[in-house]
Image (spheres, rainbow, N blue to C red):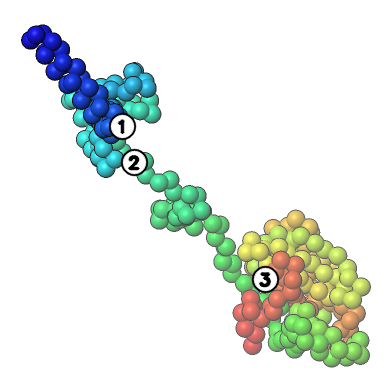
Amino acid sequence: MDDKNNDGRRSGGAAKAVKFLVGKGFYIVLFLCLAAIGISGYVILFSGNSDIDPEISGISDPGLAATVEFTGITASPGTSAPNPSGQAVGSETKIPAKATSASTAPPETAEPSEMSTSNSEKPTVEKLFYVRPVAGQTVRLYSGEVPVYNPTMGDWRIHTGIDIKADIGTEVCSVAEGVVSKIYTDDFKGVCVEIEHSDGLTSVYCGLLESVLAEVGDEVKAGTPIGGVGETALFEVLDEPHLHFEIREDGLGIDPSDVLPGNAN
């Protein structure tokens, strides 16, 4: 009898449980599913293991805002720190000085001693002693580029020298030390003698007698006789007897009065 009552109670309890599950079972299953999903997500995020790739386990998560501080590598004394570029790094690293371009380099300046040496090597021009070629007054001056009237030619032309009054046959002397370089007869200036001097000047004696006393190559001194005053200068034959005298420098005429001493009295 007791067994039957117990079986009836059990049957009634099971029926109540079934009835409860049928009425509330949907919500219970839904709750269990949500709980399972939440637990799975927690395990995936915080357990450090990945169900997708088991190889990336055990990696700590620094977080999205985490900062990794680099403290550098300190080499021990006597050793070189590792260099990612593969170049050896010494105990001290120096930045090479910026090369100075040739365009900005200061110009080289010779030392004072060198400059003085180069100046001293320049040849010095010898100062010569000059005398007048004949003793007489200057009757016509050097005109340079200014034309003057020529009575013999009846026109205006430049006068390339000076005319020194002297009688026919008056001895003509070299005005300075030099060497006789030319003896010739010019159609207008007559018999001429040229003497080159060591100071770079050339003296020219025109209208001489045909009997010249010098020869080409003769070494003469100031006052050495070279000829006599004549009348061979056809372009000035109407003038009173005189010596037409010229001085040239580098082939160009200059004023003889700047070289010769003053007129003799």
Tell me which amino acid carries mark 2.
Answer: Ile
Counting from the top left corner in percent of width and height, residue 177 is at 64, 64
Look at mark 1 in the image and give the residue it sits on. Answer: 26
Look at mark 3 in the image and give the residue it sits on. Answer: 175
Tell us which disc is closer to us: 1 or 3.
Answer: 1
Q: Viewed as shown, does residue 105 lie left or right of 137?
A: left
Label 1, label 2: how far apart the Cα atoms are = 78 Å
Visible residue check, residue 34 = no
Q: Viewed as shown, does residue 256 lie left or right of 193?
A: left
Tell us which disc is closer to us: 1 or 2.
Answer: 1
Q: Nearer the viewer, residue 59 or 137?
A: 59
For disc 3, the neighbor class at 10 Å (few under 14, some 14 to 19, many from 20) is many
Query: Which residue reaches farthest left?
Result: 2
Q: Residue at x 85, y 70 (%)?
A: 191
Counting from the top left corner in percent of width and height, residue 218 is at 73, 57
Q: Residue at x 75, y 55 (%)?
A: 217
Counting from the top left corner in percent of width and height, residue 214 is at 77, 62
- Of the residues under marks 2 and 3, which one precedes in the sequence? 2
Label 1, label 3: how far apart the Cα atoms are = 149 Å
Q: Nearer the viewer, residue 35 or 16?
A: 16
Q: Secondary structure at mark 1?
A: helix
The reply to whether callout 2 and callout 3 are in contact (CB within 8 Å) is: no
Q: Is residue 207 above or below residue 14?
A: below
Counting from the top left corner in percent of width and height, residue 57 is at 29, 21
Q: Residue at x 38, y 25 (%)?
A: 86
Look at mark 2 in the image and give the residue it sits on. Answer: 95
Q: Nearer the viewer, residue 167 or 148?
A: 148
Q: Residue at x 84, y 91 (%)?
A: 149
Label 2, label 3: how far apart the Cα atoms are = 75 Å
